[in-house]
Every structure is written in C-alpha cells, then in structure tokens.
Amino acid sequence: MTDDGLLLVPLGGTGEIGLNVMLYGLNGRWLMVDCGITFADETLPGVEIVLPDLRFIEANASKLDGLVLTHAHEDHYGAVAYVWERLGCPVWCTPFTAAMLRNKLQETRLLGRVPINVVEPGQPFSVGPFDCSLVHMTHSIAESSALVLDTPFGKVVHSGDWKLDPEPLVGEPTDIATLERLGDGGVLALVSDSTNIFNPGTSGSEAEVRASLTELIAKQPDRVVVTTFASNVARIESVMLAAEAAGREIVLAGRSMHRVVAAAKEAGYLKTMPEVMPERHAADLPRDRVVILSTGCQGEARAAMARMANGSHPHLRLDPGDTVIFSSKIIPGNERILYNLHNQLVRGGVEVITEQDHFVHVSGHPCRDEVGQLYRWLRPQIAIPVHGESRHLHEHRRFATELGIKRTVELANGDMVRIAPGEPEHVDDVPVGRIAVDATAGQVDTGADVFRERRRLMHNGTIFVSLVMDDVGSLIADPQITAIGSIRLADEGARTTLVEAIVDAIEDLADWQAAEDGRVIEAVRGGVRRGLELGRDKRPLIEVQVTRLNAETLSALEGAAS
C-alpha cells in the first residue's frame, strides 16, 4: 500500500447494490464511509444477512480514525453492530441515524461501548486528517446526507443515497444552496449514486404518493394493510395520516416498524401522529375501521406481512375482501418471492395493489435528470460512480463524460485508486468478499464448504447408508438406506437394486481394503451412484456410516439370541 496522495478503496457497493463500504486514505490514515449489509439469496441456504469482508481495514484498524454514516438504511449502516469490535473506531452521524444505530447496538450489547458523535448538516468536524461536513440530501429515509471531505488536494463530495424532492414531507429538501456554493468553490471529485441512471426524468415526490395513498385507502371497503420499507418515515407518516382521514385506527406490525417510529420520535419527527393501536387489540376493531402498517414489503418469510398471509401471525389476520397495498418497489432478485406472496394473498380472496397498477411508491434515488442537475451544481473535476451494478456504473461514467466531466473512474470492489495528485490511478488491490452471518457457524466466508453442502442438499437431497460389518469387512446384515429430498426409493424394486449395488461394491474390494472404513465408504458411494444411475447433473450428498463388530461382540450377540 502507498501512503502518497488521496486514496479511495471500495470494500463493497461497487458492481452491486447494497453492502456499501468506502475507505478514504490520506497521510497513512483511513476514514470509512458507511458499513452496510445485504440480504442472502437462495445460494446461501439458512443465511439471512451478508456482511462485507473487511479484512483489509481490520488488519489496519490502528490506522482507522473513524466511520461516517450517511444514513440509516441497512445497506449503509447495518453491519456496524456485527463488525465494530474488530474496528474499534468512533462513529459520526446525524440524530436520527444515531437513534437507529443505538437500537441496533442494544441488541448486540454494544450500546455504550461505541463512541457515537452526533452532528448536524453544516456542522464541521474532523476525522483524523480529514476536515468534514454533512450536506442534507433528500432520500427515502430521514436525514440522509452527503459527506464533504476537505483535503489538501481539493474537496471530495460523497453523495450517499439521494434524490431531488421539492416536497419530501419529512425533513428539508436537498440543500441546493450549499451544493451550489461547493461547486463555485471547486470540487475535486464527486462519488455518487448510480441506482437509477437508466431511468429518464425525475424520481417523483413523496407528497404525490401521500395524496394517492389517502385517496386509495379511503376507497377500500374492508381491512387495509400497507406494507412498505420501515425506514421510510415520510411514507409511514403518509399512511398514518391517510388512516386518520379515513376514520381508521392505525396498527403497527413488525419490530422494525416499531423501532423506526420510536427513533423518528426521538429525533423530533412524527410528533403529531395519531395514537397507535396495539396489535393484540386489532381483532376487536371492525374491518373497515383499521389500517395495518406492516413490515415485509419484500416478502421476507419472518416479517409481519408474510405471517399474516400464511395465517401464522399471533394477533393479525386477513379475510376475503381485505386489501394489501405494497407501497414499495420490488428489489431486483426478490421477484419470485414477492409474486408467490401476491398469489397467496389473491388465492385467499385478498385484493393486492402494487406500484405496477397504482401510484403508491416513488424511488428514493435520483433519475437521470437529477444526476445531471447535481453535476451542473458541483462541476467536479472527477466523476466516480458508485452504488450500482457494473452496468449502472458504466452508464453513469458515460453520462458524466457527456456532461463534460473530463476525468472519470469506474471502480470495482477492492480497487485502490489514487485520486490526487495527478491523474486518477489504480495503485493497488485489496482483498474483498462476502461474509455470511450463520446462526450455527457464526460469521463465515460465503465460499465455505458448509454452503456448498447446503446447496447440494437443497437441490439434490441426501442418501444415508448404514452398514454393519465384522472387523475383516464382511457384511453382517443388509445395508439400511434412507433417502431425503429429491431421491425417492418408494419402489421396493429400486431399493433392492440399490442394496445389491452396494453389496457388489463392497464385495469387489480386496480384503485389506474392506478392513478400512475409508475405502468402504468410497466404494459404497460409487455403488449408490451406479445403482441409481445418477447422471452428472444429479449429485446428492451420500453419507455412509460403518459400524464394526469384532468376533467377541458377535459371539456375545449370537449367545444372547440363542
């Protein structure tokens, strides 16, 4: 690693959406911006949360001066509670983000141990060699901020997640005056959100969604459930006000929803909202007198929405004629899970409303016109797209060039880039990856054998073979076979054929081989594959247990039997 100049290293969030972690280096010291998670897909059975691999900065923790959180979305702050003990650095963030973080830290018994410095937008603070300030940016969560780093080489603006919304409803609009002043003073580099770079126009306003939800909820004849991202305080407020306008009680469903409402009130939001009805009393209300505001808009199996849909929620239920409004976008990769949930609701007689058929959601990220406007305000010398898949980053870089930005950088996780002095230059690579949070194994690399075995189990099933042999390798009884998963042995003929294949495989062994458990196990696995005529595309996990009985034990058993 070089200590020269101003360095930038993404450990997550480039070439992907989620898992955002960025390092800035100066004078041999490091500042981290955001520390987020992502959620596991079907390639990681049994896992819900995935962390960034931070081994590079963990090895350099003595040089890490601090962590700045741009906002309280899981993909930007959700990993702090899992990794902080290995980092040990102070944290800077706004009041609402601090309230959200304290709730998370309490669950992992880190509350009181993590130094949290609460700062307001515009308030200067220093992290090691970096002079910093935050600029308020509108997003789908309260108090999202851009970070401004004042360095000897010029100012760097790290946008965080943002959009331009003239009526964000909760919090102030994006601080355009400060952005224009920064541009007038000169900006070295803009490191900015690429999520919606392919979408023309603008992202729309929360005020428009509020009006639409108010009208929509008032029209529904029976029980209404609105599920949305719990972190969207403006959307929560809109649903609460719409419920009040329709003469309905509001019920919060899901721990995250309660947690965000509490944090919002602590930070000064939702002060005049109507009282919330406890879940356990919701069943006592007439169906046309309740709105349930629920977690689970992405179909999460253990969230309140899915539990209501499958009838497992302890207090809340859905009946034919009820309406569920999904006031959110479908995150890419969640389509199958969500469509299954939608179908389950429809089969139960529930009306399902989504952004595809009604105006119930706007994005929290900037569309193409908004991205262009930010470049016109800031006029950076260098454009560095982040927060997007490779196709987003490439298109963002091309768009920045069209806007007249002479120098652009397209990053991948692990790239160490010197931003200044001179031309931006790739100077090194650092290790990156993904770490699964597993209930049984702890924090494990996603490439570990345990996940390969789970995928095999999920797709191919397992066959257990139990053998009882004497100490020289002769079978004392027929092999016992149990098949679980995709292999079925219900037919007695198929089971007999498999037993014969296993016996033949053992009998083909030399005497010295039959006396070794390892040789027997490998022979039996081959016999199973031949007996079942398994092709290359079918690879069940074959587990073989060998029990050896010596002559003395056999004699005792025969005597007891007689």
Image (tube, grey):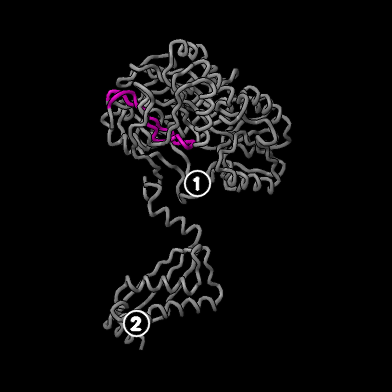
Q: Main secondary structure of the magenta part?
A: strand
Q: Which of 46 and 446 is in front in this view?
A: 446
Q: Is mark 1 on a helix, strand or loop?
A: loop
Q: Measuring 52% from the left and 28% from the top, which residue is drawn there?
A: 398
Q: Measuring 29% from the left and 84% from the top, which residue is drawn there?
A: 556
Please identify the quadrant where the C terminus is shown: bottom left
Q: What stretch is highlighted in magenta?
A: 3-27
* C-alpha gap between disc 1 and disc 2: 46 Å
Q: Is-magenta flag for residue 23?
A: yes
Please identify the quadrant where the N terminus is shown: top left
Q: Is residue 140 above or below residue 298?
A: above
Q: Which of 199 and 452 is in front in this view?
A: 199
Does the rendering let one see residue 96? Answer: no
Quarter of image, res 2: top left
Amino acid residing under circle 2: Ser
Question: Which of disc 2 and disc 1 is earlier in sequence?
Answer: 1
Quarter of image, res 515: bottom left
Q: How far from the left and from the top, in percent, is residue 304?
A: 56, 41
Give the left or right position of residue 430, taking residue 263 as reference: left
Q: How far from the left and from the top, in percent, is residue 513?
A: 31, 77
Q: Which of 560 and 539 is in front in this view?
A: 539
Residue bearing the label numbered 2: 474
Q: In this view, does 319 lie above or below 521?
A: above
Give the left or right position of residue 516, taking residue 377 as reference: left
Checking the image for residue 259, the label placed there is none
Q: Measuring 43% from the left and 21% from the top, which residue is drawn there?
A: 189
Q: What element carries label 2?
A: loop
Checking the image for residue 41, the label placed there is 1
